[in-house]
Image: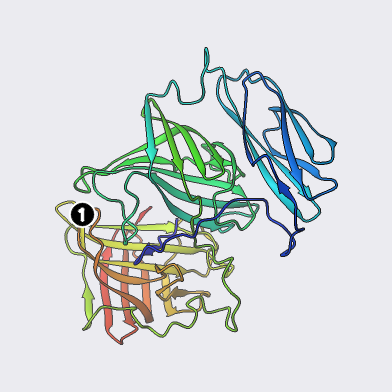
Amino acid sequence: MKRLLSLIMVAATAMFVACNSTNDDPKEGFTIVSGIEYKVAVEGGDVYVTYTGADAVSTTIISGKEAIKSVTTPAVGLVVVNFKANGTGVVRSAIVEVRAGEACATLVFLQAGTNNGGGNVGENSDVTFSANSMDGYYYGETYGEGSDRYAFFLSDYGLNNGGQAYANGTYYYIDCFAPANKSTSLPLGTYTFDGSTSGNPYTITENSQLILTGESVESTESIMMTNVKMVVSANKVVLEATIGGKVHKVTYIGDLSLDDVSGENEDDNDDNNDPTGGQDGEAQSTLTADRHVTFAGEHRAKWGYEGDYWQTGYSNYTIYIMNKSGGYVYGDTLQFDLVTNNQSTDGKFAGKYTISDKPGKMVMVAGFTNKYAQAVGSWLYEYGGSSASGYKNYAMIKSGTAEFIDNGDGTHTVILDGYDYKGNNITCNWTGEIEKD
């Protein structure tokens, strides 16, 4: 997944999730009087929803059809949702859309489960955790048509201004898909585990995991989730996951909005081929002289396939090479954002690239900061070490060339001759193995 590293963490605006309207001026007066979130007894029965401001409404079951027996509108101002008894043993959810002309509202129902003798989901959990922070990204349909991708952390400490986890923290990482709707807020619904990572709506991928950060990189532990279910309702996330043989129940209450890195919701401008928005280089580099980057001794080098991220018709790869010292990521790191001349998915990125702020065939995308103050594209940064220290120096690479030579023995030679926004020359000539990320 593309690495978008934050230089400054921007506060997210609070958003309340509702169904999208096709009209910028929805019908005035339509209001659900009885609220939008409802608790349903395990034995089922009728739930009454009252509304005002419309003579008639239509209803659609968005999810949870297995729980609902019927949805009727017996009188003006009233919707009746009849639930079946829940014999599954766990809580289940349903979402119903109520529409009056172009105006609409999304109703969320949570039905209790028997849970082997009574109670709700999580009562038999081995671990319970209340998250204080939700941080992550909305990727849009970059990773497949028909579904939007969301990736985020539920944690106790959140992320620092470098987009990094703090030491001694608990971070539940969720990678999931929802129906494509351009919503930067995590959509309401019930999400289930999909080990095949099909990209189907309301699925959670096998990338999801628990990360327990320590005092150092070596003491940080990552444990994959082997099964997970997530119920998202208005301003609330309830996650139940099997991790290391134990059942974890994670609850988060708060804003569900995520940073938009999809590029779908950018304002129109006269030069849509320039993703930098015409940045002139202010604050794009802290370098005061030329920089030659070496990766002798301990280091790590990775490549990641990003699909057709820049929508050029060619494969996009992110490659990063990091210095390490005593196990810590430390010192200079180079990140390369490459648009190839092919549609490969397995690391065919060899060739010579021109550095440009306009993505295209055999272009290494220049570094810039987006409107969320995240560093995008190709850049150099000097990492200070430890899990929460941030960056000591950095420079967006604006122009020049970069060549990746496949040596035929499992190694690549990387030759960089680039320039930052201040005209400093950033160079590198390194040979080594670049592993799949």
Residue identified by numbered label 1: 386
**Residue 128 horizontal side relative to residue 345, left or right:** left
Q: Position of residue 47 (x, y in %)?
A: 71, 29
Residue 412, percent from left and from top: 33, 64
Q: Nearer the viewer, residue 25 or 238?
A: 25
Residue 255, position in %: x, y?
Answer: 48, 50
Which quarter shows the N terminus?
bottom left
Q: Position of residue 243 (x, y in %)?
A: 39, 31
- Residue that appears at 73% across and 32% down: 48
Taking the spot 44% from the left edge, 53% from the top edge, the residue there is 136
Q: Residues within 10 Å of mark 1 (few under 14, many from 20)?
A: some
Q: Is residue 55 above or below residue 244?
A: below
Viewer-side residue, 47 vs 314: 47
Residue 90 lies left or right of residue 391; in this view the side is right
Q: In this picture, is 293 found above or below 106?
A: below
| Above-or-below relation of 248 to 335 | above
**Quadrant in the rendering for residue 203:** top right
For numbered disc 1, what is the local secondary structure? loop
- Amino acid at dot 1: Ser
Give the vertical position of 209 relative to 403 (above or below). Answer: above
